[in-house]
Structure formats: structure tokens, C-alpha cells
Image: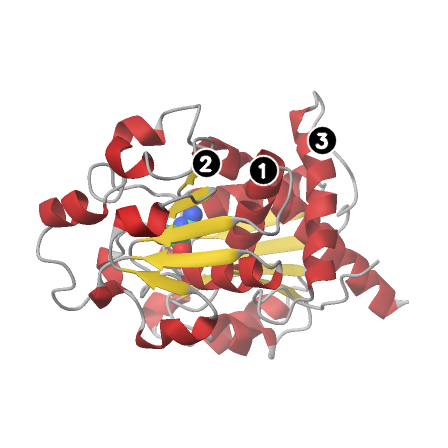
Amino acid sequence: MTFRGRHLLGIEPLHPMEITTILDLADEYVGLSRSRSKHSDVLKGLTQINMFFENSTRTQASFELAGKRLGADVMSMQMQASSIKKGETLIDTALTLNAMHPDLLVVRHPHSGAVDLLAQKVNCAVLNAGDGRHEHPTQALLDALTIRRAKGRLHRLNIAICGDIAHSRVARSNILLLGKMENRIRLVGPPTLIPSGAADWGVEVYGDMKEGLSGCDVVMMLRLQKERMDGGFIPSEREYYHRFGLDAAKLAVAKEDAIVMHPGPMNRGVEIDGTIADDINRSVIQEQVEMGVAVRMAAMDLLAQNLRAEAA
Ligand code: NCD
């Protein structure tokens, strides 16, 4: 086995072989999830706690389902109603939960680095479900699996990541993963939404959709993350859609078989035209959701195997 980590905190420390190991196992779990019984016992007897300090629909549901399909005892904390509201620190909350002997802790937090910090304080395996603008490793892995299944490979592809790069942990984790697998990455967006150091990341930067999308295999759209913006990053949503929203005319310059991706939740009519998002010949957005469950099953299975090896 080639995945040795104790936690899954980000894509940054992963070796390409580890990424391939997770994706190969996830492919098997797609099969299980499509079967009638959908059930395995690989996490039987283990306790999984989900702590989401930020709103989430698909990531939280997907982690919950992944744990249940593998037989874990799964508890999702309602963080909005938790002691955080009474002033408890993140670390105290973590230590309290740690005393209940969880095996897997799935954490989403609005601050970059908060999940890493928490991982240093607990005895169990920690999975980062998104920390601030930093990383969202399982999203990048599910995107990679979706691309690999649609394109038949995960290398030497032209991939355009478009929109609000500056506030996006999805973009960061994807740039790291797709770069490790030797793809050509283009970032497309207005200068206000492209981080200043981006040119040093081994990517190409474009300020024009038609230039950036020309001849590409994959078009990955990002949500305009209004909740992380504190000033005027765009003139107006209407203007943004006109220049950077994905519509049929802009997509026409990509390869004929280019796929369209979006991590969700989507702002239809802001970063993407609803008709394109729903076009089953181009959009793989629903496949991304399906791959999300499989990738999280694989990641938790591998971490649990490492926990057992450590205890033996
Ligand atoms: C993303 C996130 O939370 O970072 N969504 C997700 O996990 N599916 C992207 C976003 O919120 O725009």
C-alpha cells in the first residue's frame, strides 16, 4: 500500500503514487455505491465525528454517507448550536471530542490552518473538509477522479480553472494535485480575483475567457465566494457574468469534447449559465457529487488501515 499518512490535511504533502492509490480504491467504491446493498464493514466498530464550523451541503452529506456505507458509527455535530457559541475555543472542543475516542474526525473551518492545528491535539485521524482559503483535499481528489474517468487519463491535459481563484481552497488544492500529475494549468479571471503570487505556481494566467479556454480539455468553474470578500472585487454580477460567466459562446473555443465542472454550490447566471450546467453532454457536475462519496470512502478506509497498522 502506498498511502502512509496519519491524516488527510491537504494535497501538498501527497506523493503522486498516494493520489493514485486513493483514486484507484475510490474507483472500486463507485462500484459498491452503484450496487444494490451499498454496504461494507471496513470501518465497523470505528467512530467518525463530523465537525462543520462552516455551512455545507454536499461535503457534509457525502462524508456522512461514506462513513455509513463503510459501517462506521457516524455522528455529525451541529456546530451552530454548540459550545463554540458559549465561547469555547476550537482546541477545547477538539479535546472534549477526543476524550470520546473517535477514530476519524472530519473538520471544516473558516480559518486557514485551523484543521492542521486541531490535528496536532487529537489522537485520531483528521480529514480536512475545507479550511478557509487553504485546502480542500477531498474536493481535489473527487475532481481528479471525475476527470480521470471522463478523459481516460489524469496527465497531459489542458485544464482551465476559472473565476474566484483568490478565495478558493478548491482552486488551491486542484492546482497542487493537477500540477503533481503533470497537467497544463491555466487560471482565468479578473486580476482582482487572481492571487498576486499565482505566476510562480507553475500555471499560466489569463484575464480573458476566450484566450484562457482555447483548446482546453477541462473547464473548471468556481463560485464567486461573496462571504469571503470584504471589498469591491467585481464591478457588478452582471458585468462579471458578461466577461467571466461560462456560456455557450465562451465554451465554444474549448475542445469539442471538453468537460465542464463546478464544485457547487453554483450561482447560476453569475459564474455559469444554467443551460450549460445542466447539459449532460458537457457538464460532469453530478458525476463530481457521485465521485465525492467514493473518494471519501477510499480516504477513510486508507486512514483506518494506517490507524490499525500503527496500533498493531
Ligand atoms: C466548495 C467549498 O466549500 O470550498 N464547495 C464544496 O465543498 N463543494 C466550494 C465553494 O463553496 O464554492
Label located before the other in sequence (3 or 2):
3
- Residue at the extreme top of the image, as rendered: 36
Q: Secondary structure at mark 3?
A: helix
- On the image, numbered disc 2 is attached to which residue? 259
Q: Where residue 36 sits: x, y (%)? A: 70, 20
Query: Residue 119, located in which quarter of the rendered image?
Result: bottom right
Would you say the residues marked 1 and 2 are in contact, meaning their CB atoms lie under 8 Å apart? yes
Q: Residue at x 27, y 49 (%)?
A: 209
Whole-Å distance between the Cαs marked 1 and 2? 9 Å
Q: Where residue 90 sits: x, y (%)? A: 45, 74
Name the kind of residue labelled 2 in the image: Ile
Whole-Å distance between the Cαs marked 1 and 3? 22 Å
Label located before the other in sequence (1 or 2):
1
- On the image, numbered disc 1 is attached to which residue? 151
Name the kind of residue labelled 1 in the image: Lys
Residue 32 disc label? 3
